[in-house]
Amino acid sequence: MKRESETMGGSSQGPWCVWQGLTVSGFFRLLALRPPFHWRKTLRWMLVTVSAFYNSLMKLIERAVWGRRIARLELQPPVFILGHWRSGTTLLHYLMSRDPQFTYCNLYQIIGCPHFLITEGFVTRLTGRWLPRTRPMDNVPVTWDSPQEDESALCLMTMLSPYLMLTFNNQRQVYERYFDLLDLTPSEWQRWKTAFIDYLKRLCVRTGRRALLKSPTHTYRIRRLLEIFPEAKFVYIHRNPYEVYTSTMHLRRKLFEANTLGKYTEDGMEADLMQTYEHLIRRYEEDKKLLRLDQLYEVRFEDLERDPVAQLEAIYRQLQMPGIEALKKILEPELAGLKEYKKNAYKPMDEALKRRIYDRFRQAFDAYGYPSGLAEEAATRPAAAAAPAAVN
């Protein structure tokens, strides 16, 4: 019998896995961490190894062609989209990425992160037919130009990323320091910062536009990001914690299975998710105090889904950014299609699991005004709405 996650929307990644974006030096950094190995992943290991040599060669050529222009570029302060995984960051990123004042990280610029400036044009034309139709965890269409998370590229470039969990998925001690980056050694911090700035320059060098970045991991890093970009702006999106939990568990099952280099396991997955969520809320609520009013806007996913134009107007107004009228004209013919998007549906959550989630995520329920939906609360407060079945 198939697990519930296997019956949901989404398709296989086919031959692709994130580790195929490693260079030779990155591959040896990964090996130094002693990643798990399973014989069923032998082909995946072989493809990663071959790709590493290709990526290193192409990286050298890219530096020869683009190096001076990259070095001269002055970056504008980026706009960061924050929020836990499956909180609506993908929708918000897509909507804002349609604004022509921004540049963003796409799928090819993750897999081809060492050399995309010289290879993106011809590789994407040759390989587009092999891409999966939708993402593994949902029904969002996939193209090489789809907006993606820059954290995946940072993982490949530095090996200082929580996305090591994709193959070390039951070994939190390997990646725990890399969420907020506060416990990095000086040399590790310099390596991460140098790689981050270099990657942003390469994203922006063709157009000189401002970078729009979406990675849930940056939600932990406001303090560190302000060290690099004091004038950066942030949009934080939150969603009902029950829905976040269910959808994130589905996300993890799909992505871990599709990218692990060892034997896929769900051991410790729920505990790790809960610890990760709690850490995100605590860190964000503490560090957002460092931001001015014109640097941060908070939005509810439910409000964005119901009226995206109104929420975008509020975001641009509070962050004092131009361009909202041009963006509205671009989005107007697309809004009907967005409303037709079919989200994954899951079985109703049992009371014991709801209680565990509520107890662990109480800070989020209270901070963002979501009802507990627990049976005992419904009995004492009849007007309180029951928690909805979790959706993606």
Image (cartoon, helix red, strand yellow):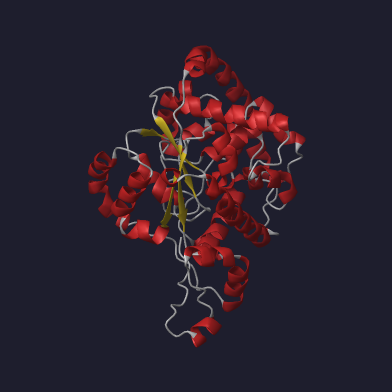
Q: Quadrant of residue 127?
A: top left
Q: In this view of the protein, which residue sits in the foreground, 307 or 74?
A: 74
Label count reads 0
The location of residue 295, given as percent across then percent down, is: 44, 43
Left or right? Give the position of 121 relative to 358.
left
The location of residue 183, given as percent across then percent down, is: 71, 41
Residue 51: in sight, yes or no? no
Q: Quadrant of residue 37?
A: top right
Left or right? Give the position of 299 relative to 306.
right
Q: In this view of the protein, which residue sits in the foreground, 4 or 93?
A: 93
Residue visible at 44% across and 79% down? 384
Residue 88: in sight, yes or no? yes
The location of residue 76, given as percent across then percent down, is: 44, 29
Query: In this picture, is 343 found above or below 284?
Result: below
Query: In this picture, is 295 found above or below 202?
Result: below
Q: In this view of the protein, which residue sits in the foreground, 77 or 36?
A: 77
Left or right? Give the position of 128 relative to 28.
left
Q: Quadrant of residue 212?
A: top left
Residue visible at 48% across and 72% down? 371
The location of residue 219, given as percent across then percent down, is: 55, 47
